Image (tube, helix red, strand yellow):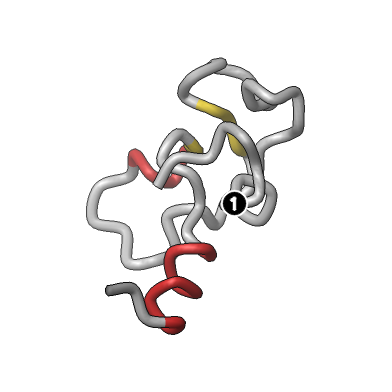
Amino acid sequence: METPETALKTAQLPCRHLRCKEMFYGGSEEDDYAGGAYWCSLTQETMGPDGVPCGKKECCANRTCYVT
């Protein structure tokens, strides 16, 4: 059973299709999404399949294309 704390953590995770160039650096101790240049791995563009721009805060559970 999902607790409120677990649900909150899940809701804050970015979509699994969100990409940022820092994700491809080896051995980085910093936030994978720190750079600010985002794209969607489904569309290969800065816009998601729903036509809304991609971003760490934007690609969250309230979007129709969001996948955990």
Q: Is residue 33 above or below residue 65?
A: below
Q: Residue at x 63, y 21 (%)?
A: 49
x then y, percent, for residue 23? 38, 44
| Circle 1: element type | loop
Q: Residue at x 32, y 67 (%)?
A: 29
In the rendered image, the residue lying farthest to the right is 52
x then y, percent, for residue 61? 57, 52
Q: Is residue 32 above or below residue 43?
A: below
In the rendered image, the residue lying farthest to the front is 1
Asked if residue 20 can be seen in this view, the reply is no
Give the tally of numbered discs: 1
Where does the N terminus fall, quadrant-wise? Answer: bottom left
Q: Nearer the viewer, residue 15 or 34?
A: 15
Q: Residue at x 43, y 83 (%)?
A: 5
Q: Nearer the viewer, residue 22 or 67?
A: 67
Specify few, some or many for label 1: CA neighbours under 10 Å numbering under 14, 14-19, or 20 or more.
many
x then y, percent, for residue 26? 25, 47
Q: Is residue 44 above or below residue 53?
A: above
Q: Nearer the viewer, residue 44 or 13?
A: 13
Quarter holding residue 43: top right
Q: Nearer the viewer, residue 65 or 33?
A: 65
Q: Is residue 65 left or right of residue 42?
A: right
x then y, percent, for residue 15? 48, 44
Q: Residue at x 74, y 34 (%)?
A: 53
Asked if residue 3 can be seen in this view, the reply is yes
**Residue labelled with disc 1:** 60
Amino acid type, callout 1 = Cys
